[in-house]
Image (cartoon, rainbow, N blue to C red):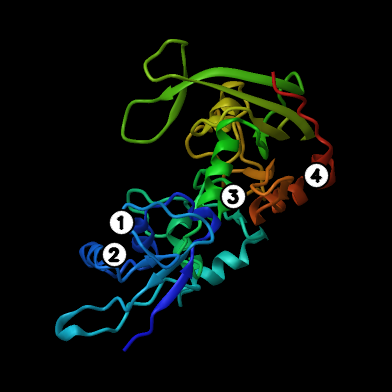
Amino acid sequence: MAAIETVTVAPDEAGMRLDRWFREHYPAVSFGHVQKLIRSGQVRVDGGRVKTNARLEPGQAVRVPPLGGGPGGEDKAPPRLGGPKPTGDAEFLRSILLYEDNEVFVFNKPQGLAVQGGSGLTRHVDGMLDALTDRRGQKPRLVHRLDRDTSGVLVVARTRLAAQQLAEAFRQRSTRKVYWALVRGVPRPKQGRISTWLGKEGGPEEKMQVVRHGAENATHAVSLYSVVETAGQKLAWLSMRPVTGRTHQLRVHAAHIGHPIIGDPKYFEAESSWDFPGGIQNKLHLHARRIVMPHPKGGTLDVTAPLPPHMQQSWNLLGFDASLGEQADLGEEE
């Protein structure tokens, strides 16, 4: 017969309903069976009987009886979720890990890997995060996104409470995100602010465009940029900062000012006379270089991601000094 288990309620489970707590910790047990166990008093909280809609508090002890109850009175309990799953996903995610603590993971997402699933996508970060489910059954949670072809810093919350706090930091714009991009030509002035309204283009392909103020479903988008180095007048390395967080914002804004990002399959439209530089790969040259934001436990989370291989190759070819990028100052938000 399976033993009785006592499980302590975690800090980030404050206010969770008891029946939902069971669903998260023991997903193999049916909802009806959990209700029966609670109503019969076999499940107790701090030694007392409770109702199914009772709200839990951190530190409380939940008495968990054998959870089988199957045909023939079998008492074999389904295991709680816990530990990395035996797949290659955990190993891959660990290989791109930039930083971790009890609240967050920060990954260096490769170019070409989607953050979430979509049409025809079977491999994406969100799906891989199942492999990092902790011993209490908590799967890490996405709190922001990067385009599939954009590489760089991706912050993931390890707990429910951390996810709420990090998401709020993004909503309140108390997060500073710095991207590096290689663009065609050299913007004038060398530092600037781009402010437009963006809306979706018609057609099946997800593509954004600059629209007039007042257009249907238009959203305001603001980006800051600074030229770090140039290769003559043909190419420029930009440090870019999105003040707002719209779909494809930096890519659309770069194209809007006449300096599209190299290798952008959606927004780079080169004239017939423009030759793609030799030795530079035709891949999107946009990288989420750094993120600075409030940490859920106080203080500041400040993480930097190294360039992806195709951009590092371009930087080497063009003789760009990566240390100069750290000094680029985009100024304050307006």
- Mark 3 to mark 2 CA distance (whole Å): 40 Å
- Mark 1 to mark 3 CA distance (whole Å): 40 Å
- Mark 4 to mark 1 CA distance (whole Å): 65 Å
Kindly report which numbered mark, 4 or 2, lies closer to the viewer in this rendering: 2
Callout 4 environment at 10 Å: few (<14), some (14 to 19), or many (20+)? some
Q: Which residue is identified by label 3? A: 154
- Upstream in sequence: badge 3 or badge 4: 3
- Upstream in sequence: badge 2 or badge 1: 2
Give the residue drawn at x 50%, y 52%: 160
Which residue ends up furthest to the bottom in the rendered image? Answer: 1
Q: Which residue is identified by label 2? A: 38
Kindly report which numbered mark, 3 or 2, lies closer to the viewer in this rendering: 2
Q: Which residue is identified by label 4? A: 320
Residue 30 position (above or below residue 72): above
Give the residue drawn at x 39%, y 80%: 4
- Upstream in sequence: badge 3 or badge 2: 2
